[in-house]
C-alpha cells in the first residue's frame, strides 16, 4: 500500500523586543546566568505580570504577514506544570481565544506552489534553562531566558513530506527575520520547531495515529528527523503493526529518534484564564497602524527583482534571503544602475567573503556605495574584471574605497594607445620567429602575443585595446 | 488614657499640636505589645528596631511640617504583604525563611505617608481559613475572650487593633478575611472594590478575589487609611485607573433619603439570634436616621459558597505551585530525585487545609472536569455579579450580618471544614462580585462578644460605605467598649 505522510508543525519564535514579556528585564542572549532577572520573572511571591505591548505588536506583524485573521480580543491562560526552569509552576500562554487564526503561507514545491494553512499564532513566555553539572550530581538553573517573549505558530496538518516541511519552515523563518521580530538563530534556540507526523493510505481522508517529534535544531535536522519518522512509521504499518501516540526526541548524532519517557509527557496542563491579566483588545485602528509598518515581504520582493532588474529567479532568491542583503543589493543597483553586474558581484565576491568569515551583510566592510563605484570603474573600462577582483579583495580587507586602492597599487588600466603601441612593437620585434608563423597563417600564435603583451604590461592593459592594436600591427 | 488606645485622627491632632511625639506613640504601642502579646499572639514577627527609626524619621517630618497623613502612626501588616528585607511567611512553614527583595505597593504607600510598621501579623496559612488556626505559627486569641478565635484569615491584624497592639492594620480579604475577623474582634474592616488597592506584593491566594484593606478602630480612621492606599498601580494589570475621592469627605453626611437593601437570603435559619437581633437593631436605627430599608432578593446567594470553593482553590493551586523547594522557601532534605524533592518539600511545607484546597483546585481544573466545575462556576459567578448590579440599580447600599455567629471557641470547628467554611457565608459574595464591603461593630452578645454588621455597595463606591458606616457609628456611640486584657 502506498502511504502519505501528514505533518503539522509548531514553531516557537523568540521575539526581539528589548524587554521581556511581563517585566522590564533585558532579553539579550549570553549574559551571566541569572543577571537578567527580577522578582517578577523569578516568580517571587506576590509579584504580578504586566504585558509588554511591543510583544502584541510583533505578534500582529507576523499574523498579518501570514494572512491570519486577528481577533478583536484575546486571553492569556496559565499552563500548569512543575519543572525547575519554570519558576511560577505555570507558563503564561494563550489557549482559548488566541489572537490570530486562519492564516496561510505559500511555498514552492516540485511542480508549483502550495498553500499551507496556519491554525493559530499566540504569545507566551519562554522558560529558563537547566544546566547539569558533568562532574557532580548538581543541576543549576539560569532564568535569564524566563519571560523572553515567544510566539507559537501552529500549522494545519497540510504538509505532505519532509521537503515540504523544510520549505514551510524556511518561509516562516525568512518572514520572521524580514519583519525584524526574530533573529532566527536556530542554534541559540530563537527559532524552534516541533512536528506532528502520521501516515495514512494515499487517498484516505482520515488521519492515522501521530507521533510528536522534538529537539530538531536546524532545518537539516528537521528534514532528516521527518524522513526518519516517515520511514519508521511506514515500516511499522507495512509490518502489520501500529504507531503509538508518543513524543519522540531526535538524536542528531545517531540519526534516530527515541520515545520520551511516559512520565514526562503525561501532563494535564490544567489550562485556565490567567486572573492576573486582563483581555487584550486589538481594535481596527491598531491593526491598521501595525499594517503600515510592514515591510515588503520576501516573496513579493523576489518577484519584483525578477521583473524590474531582469535577473534570474534563482539570483532573486539568493539576493532576498535576508532583508539586509536585499537592501544592500538594491542600494548598489540604485547607485550603479547596473542590476546584472551588481547581482554578479554581490552573489559572487561579497557573499563568498561573508560566508568565509561567517559574517552578516550588515557587518560587510564594503559599503554599497563603494561596490557601486567599483562597478562603474569596470563599466568605464578603467580596470579589467581581473583587476577588479584584486581591488574588491583589498576593499574587503581594508575597507578602503576602490579609487584609492587602484591609485595606490598603480592598477589603472593602460588605455593609452601610443604607450601600448610602443610596448606591442617591442614585443613583436623581440619575437621574429612567431611573427613569421603568424604571417604564414598560423593564427593560434596570436594568443602567444597577447600573453606576451599582458606580461610586459603586468596585466594592466585593456584587453580589448591589446586585441585591436595587435591585430593591426601584426598585419604589418 | 494611654496613647495606644487612641485613633489615628486623635493621634494626628496630638502629634501636630506637639502634645506628644512619634517616638512616644511608638513606645506606648510596644509597651502594650509587651504586656498583652503573650496572651493575644497577634504577631508572627515584630519590627521593633525599624519602627523606632521610622518614628524618628516621622518626628523629623512633623517638625519640618512635611509630615504625611500617617506620620508617626504605628501600623501592623498582615504577614501576606511583602516587606523588603523583612521576613514574610504568609503563615506557612514553606515561607518560614523567606525575605522578600521588594516592598508591596501598599507598603511603599504607607511608608511614604509616614507610617511606622510595628510588625507582621498572624494569619491562616496562605489566608486559607477563618480562624488563624491553620497558621504554622499558632492561633491568635480573640482579645474579647482568649478562649475564642479572632476570625480569619486576617485574625492577627484584627486582634492587634482590638488589643491596642497597633493603631491600625492592613489585612487581605479573599472571601471575608477582613470583614469576618473585624466583626469578631469588634473593629472596623473594609474590603475595597477589586482593583481599587494594588495587589502588587500581596502574596496571592486567589488572584481574582484577593484585595487588601484596612482594620481600624473607627470609620474615620478607615477613611484616612483608604486615602493613602487606594489608587491605580501600573504594576498590576487588574488595577483600575478610576479616580480616588477624598474618603474623609463622606464622613458625617448621614443617610437621609437613602435606600438600603436587606437581602432576604441573608436572614436564614442558622443565624445566631443575638446576631440577628443586633443587625435588626441597626436597621431600626438607620430608619430612624431617615434611610428607607427595603427587602430585596439576591437570588443566586445560595450558590456563592459552592462557586467560591471551586474558583478560589483553582486559582490557589496554580498560585501555590511556585513553592516547590527549588529556589526559595522550605526544601525537604534527602530527596532521591526531582519528583521526590517536590513531593517531600510540598508535603512537609504545607499544612492540611492548604493541601486540601490545592487538591480541590487541581481536581476542578483537571481535563474532563474543567467544564463541569471551573467553567460552570465562572458562569454562575457572572450571575451573582448580576444580582448585585440589579440590586444597586435601586439601592444605595445593602445591609447584612457580617457573620452568622459571634467568635467561636478555639478548636470548635477545626475538624469540620464545612462548618468552618460556613462562617464566611455572608462575606464571600462581595469577593465574587468584586464589590466593596465594610464590617462595623453593631453590638455585643450577652457573653460580651462583638457582633458586626456588613454594608455592601456598588463597584468603586467605598465612599458610600464610609458614609453609611459613619452615620451608623454616630447613632450607636454608647456601644464603645474595650476588651479587658
Ligand atoms: Zn524580570
Image (cartoon, coloured by chain):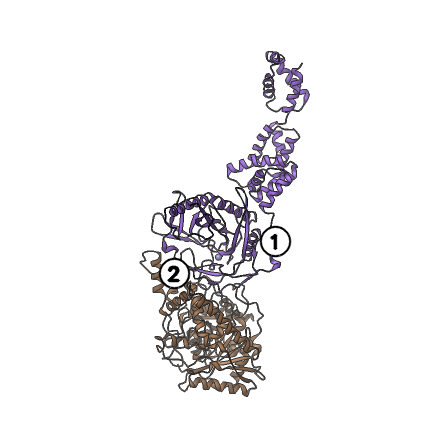
Chain colours: A purple, B brown
Q: Percent from the top left, x then y, of residue A100?
A: 54, 56
Question: Badge 1: few (under 14), some or many (20 or more) residues near its Cα, within 10 Å?
Answer: some
**As drawn, which residue projects farthest toward the right?**
A418
Residue sitting nearer the eye, A220 or A42: A220
Question: Badge 2: few (under 14), some or many (20 or more) residues near its Cα, within 10 Å?
Answer: many
Place residue B4 in its image quadrant.
bottom left
Q: Percent from the top left, x then y, of residue A77?
A: 48, 61
Say which quadrant the C terminus of chain A sits in: top right
Chain letter of disc 1 in the image: A
Front tag of 2 and 1: 1
Residue sitting nearer the eye, A186 or B87: A186
Q: Circle 1 is placed at which residue position? A: A291
Q: Is ligand 1 closer than 8 angstroms to the Cβ of mark 2?
A: no
Image disc number at residue B359: none
Q: Residue B140, can we see it? A: no
Q: Percent from the top left, x then y, of residue B479?
A: 47, 85
Residue sitting nearer the eye, A470 or B369: B369
Above or below for B124 versus A467: below
Q: Percent from the top left, x then y, of residue A112?
A: 55, 43
Marks 2 and 1, how far apart at CA = 44 Å
> How many numbered discs, if any?
2
Q: Is ligand 1 closer than 8 angstroms to the Cβ of mark 1?
A: no
Place residue A83 in its image quadrant.
bottom left
Q: Residue A464, can we see it? A: yes
Q: Secondary structure at mark 1?
A: helix
Above or below for A387 versus A296: above
Q: Circle 2 is placed at which residue position? A: B324
Residue sitting nearer the eye, A236 or A39: A236
Same-chain status of marks 2 and 1: no
Amino acid at each position: 500500500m502506498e502511504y502519505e505522510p501528514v505533518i503539522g508543525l509548531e514553531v516557537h519564535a523568540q521575539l526581539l523586543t528589548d524587554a521581556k514579556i511581563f517585566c522590564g528585564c533585558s532579553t539579550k542572549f549570553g549574559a551571566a546566568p541569572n543577571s537578567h532577572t527580577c522578582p517578577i520573572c523569578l516568580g517571587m511571591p506576590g509579584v504580578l505580570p504586566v504585558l509588554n505591548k511591543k510583544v502584541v505588536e510583533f505578534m500582529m506583524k507576523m499574523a498579518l504577514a501570514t494572512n491570519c485573521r486577528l481577533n478583536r480580543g484575546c486571553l492569556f491562560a496559565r499552563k500548569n506544570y512543575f519543572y525547575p526552569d519554570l519558576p511560577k509552576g505555570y507558563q503564561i500562554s494563550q489557549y482559548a481565544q488566541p489572537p490570530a487564526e486562519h492564516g496561510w503561507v505559500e511555498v514552492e514545491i516540485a511542480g508549483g506552489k502550495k498553500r499551507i494553512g496556519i491554525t493559530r499564532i499566540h504569545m507566551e513566555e519562554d522558560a529558563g534553562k537547566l544546566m547539569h553539572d558533568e562532574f557532580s550530581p548538581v543541576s543549576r538553573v539560569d532564568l535569564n531566558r524566563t519571560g523572553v517573549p515567544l510566539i507559537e505558530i501552529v500549522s494545519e496538518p497540510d504538509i505532505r513530506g519532509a521537503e515540504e516541511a523544510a520549505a514551510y519552515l524556511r518561509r516562516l523563518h525568512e518572514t520572521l527575520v524580514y519583519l525584524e521580530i526574530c533573529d532566527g538563530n536556530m542554534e541559540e534556540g530563537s527559532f524552534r520547531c516541533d512536528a506532528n507526523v502520521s501516515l495514512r493510505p494515499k487517498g484516505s481522508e482520515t488521519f492515522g495515529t501521530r507521533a510528536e517529534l522534538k529537539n530538531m535544531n536546524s532545518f537539516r535536522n528537521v528534514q532528516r528527523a521527518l524522513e526518519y519518522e516517515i520511514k519508521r512509521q511506514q515500516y511499522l504499518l507495512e509490518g502489520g503493526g501500529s504507531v503509538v501516540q508518543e513524543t519522540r526526541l531526535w538524536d542528531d548524532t545517531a540519526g534516530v529518534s527515541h520515545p520520551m519517557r511516559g512520565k514526562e509527557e503525561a501532563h494535564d496542563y490544567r489550562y485556565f484564564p490567567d486572573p492576573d491579566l486582563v483581555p487584550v483588545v486589538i481594535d481596527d485602528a491598531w491593526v491598521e497602524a501595525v499594517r503600515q509598518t510592514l515591510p515588503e515581504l520576501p516573496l513579493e520582493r523576489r518577484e519584483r527583482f525578477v521583473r524590474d532588474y531582469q535577473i534570474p529567479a534563482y539570483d532573486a532568491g539568493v539576493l532576498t534571503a535576508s532583508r539586509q542583503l536585499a537592501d544592500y543589493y538594491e542600494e548598489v543597483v540604485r547607485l550603479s544602475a547596473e542590476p546584472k553586474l551588481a547581482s554578479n558581484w554581490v552573489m559572487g565576491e561579497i557573499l563568498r567573503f561573508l560566508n568565509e568569515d561567517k559574517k552578516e551583510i550588515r557587518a560587510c566592510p564594503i559599503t554599497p556605495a563603494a561596490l557601486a563605484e567599483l562597478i562603474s570603474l569596470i563599466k568605464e573600462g578603467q580596470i579589467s574584471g581581473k583587476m577588479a577582483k584584486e581591488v574588491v579583495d583589498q576593499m574587503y580587507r581594508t575597507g578602503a574605497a576602490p579609487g584609492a586602492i587602484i591609485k595606490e597599487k598603480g592598477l589603472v588600466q593602460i588605455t593609452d594607445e601610443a604607450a601600448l603601441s610602443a610596448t606591442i612593437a617591442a614585443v613583436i620585434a623581440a619575437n621574429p620567429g612567431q611573427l613569421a608563423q603568424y604571417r604564414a597563417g598560423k593564427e593560434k600564435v596570436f594568443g602567444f602575443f597577447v600573453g606576451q603583451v599582458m606580461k610586459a604590461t603586468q596585466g594592466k592593459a585593456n584587453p580589448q585595446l591589446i586585441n585591436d592594436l595587435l591585430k593591426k600591427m601584426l598585419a604589418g | 488614657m494611654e496613647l495606644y488606645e487612641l485613633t489615628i485622627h486623635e493621634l494626628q491632632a496630638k502629634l501636630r499640636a506637639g502634645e506628644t511625639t512619634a517616638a512616644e506613640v511608638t513606645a506606648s504601642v510596644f509597651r502594650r505589645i509587651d504586656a498583652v502579646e503573650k496572651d493575644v499572639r497577634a504577631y508572627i514577627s515584630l519590627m521593633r528596631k525599624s519602627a523606632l527609626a521610622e518614628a524618628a524619621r516621622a518626628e523629623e517630618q512633623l517638625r519640618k511640617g512635611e509630615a504625611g497623613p500617617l506620620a508617626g502612626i504605628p501600623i501592623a501588616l498582615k504577614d501576606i504583604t511583602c516587606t523588603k528585607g523583612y521576613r514574610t511567611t504568609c503563615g506557612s512553614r514553606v515561607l518560614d525563611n523567606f525575605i522578600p527583595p521588594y516592598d508591596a505597593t501598599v507598603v511603599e504607600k504607607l511608608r511614604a505617608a509616614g507610617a511606622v510598621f510595628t510588625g507582621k501579623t498572624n494569619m491562616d496559612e496562605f489566608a486559607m481559613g477563618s480562624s488563624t488556626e491553620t497558621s504554622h505559627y499558632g492561633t491568635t486569641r480573640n482579645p474579647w475572650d482568649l478562649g475564642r478565635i479572632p476570625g480569619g484569615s486576617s485574625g492577627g491584624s484584627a486582634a492587634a487593633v482590638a488589643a491596642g497592639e497597633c493603631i491600625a492594620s492592613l489585612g487581605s480579604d479573599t472571601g471575608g478575611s477582613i470583614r469576618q475577623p473585624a466583626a469578631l474582634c469588634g473593629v472596623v474592616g473594609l474590603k475595597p472594590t477589586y482593583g481599587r488597592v494594588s495587589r502588587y506584593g500581596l502574596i496571592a491566594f486567589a488572584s481574582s478575589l484577593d484585595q487588601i484593606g484596612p482594620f481600624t478602630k473607627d470609620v474615620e480612621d478607615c477613611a484616612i487609611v483608604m486615602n493613602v492606599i487606594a489608587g491605580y498601580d501600573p504594576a498590576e494589570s487588574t488595577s483600575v485607573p478610576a479616580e480616588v475621592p477624598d474618603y474623609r469627605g463622606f464622613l458625617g453626611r448621614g443617610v437621609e433619603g437613602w435606600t438600603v437593601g436587606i437581602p432576604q437570603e441573608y436572614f436564614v435559619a442558622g443565624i445566631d439570634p443575638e446576631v440577628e437581633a443586633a443587625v435588626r437593631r441597626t436597621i431600626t436605627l438607620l430608619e430612624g436616621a431617615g434611610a428607607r430599608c427595603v427587602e430585596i432578593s439576591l437570588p443566586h446567594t445560595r450558590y456563592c459558597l459552592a462557586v467560591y470553593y471551586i474558583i478560589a482553590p483553582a486559582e490557589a493551586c496554580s498560585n501555590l505551585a511556585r513553592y516547590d523547594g527549588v529556589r526559595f522557601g522550605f526544601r525537604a532534605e534527602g530527596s532521591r530525585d526531582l519528583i521526590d524533592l517536590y513531593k517531600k518539600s510540598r508535603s512537609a511545607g504545607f499544612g492540611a487545609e492548604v493541601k486540601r484546597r490545592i487538591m480541590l483546585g487541581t481536581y476542578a481544573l483537571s481535563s474532563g472536569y474543567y467544564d463541569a466545575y471551573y467553567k460552570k462556576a465562572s458562569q454562575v459567578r457572572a450571575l451573582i455579579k448580576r444580582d448585585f448590579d440589579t440590586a444597586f440599580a435601586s439601592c444605595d447600599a445593602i445591609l447584612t450580618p457580617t457573620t452568622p455567629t459571634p467568635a467561636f471557641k478555639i478548636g470548635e470547628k477545626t475538624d469540620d471544614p464545612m462548618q468552618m467554611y460556613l462562617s464566611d457565608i455572608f462575606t464571600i459574595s462581595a469577593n465574587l462580585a468584586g464589590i466593596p464591603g465594610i464590617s462595623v461593630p453593631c453590638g455585643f452578645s450577652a457573653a460580651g462578644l462583638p457582633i458586626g454588621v456588613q454594608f455592601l455597595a456598588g463597584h468603586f463606591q467605598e465612599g458610600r460605605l464610609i458614609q453609611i458606616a459613619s452615620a451608623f457609628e454616630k447613632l450607636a456611640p454608647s456601644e464603645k467598649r474595650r476588651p479587658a486584657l
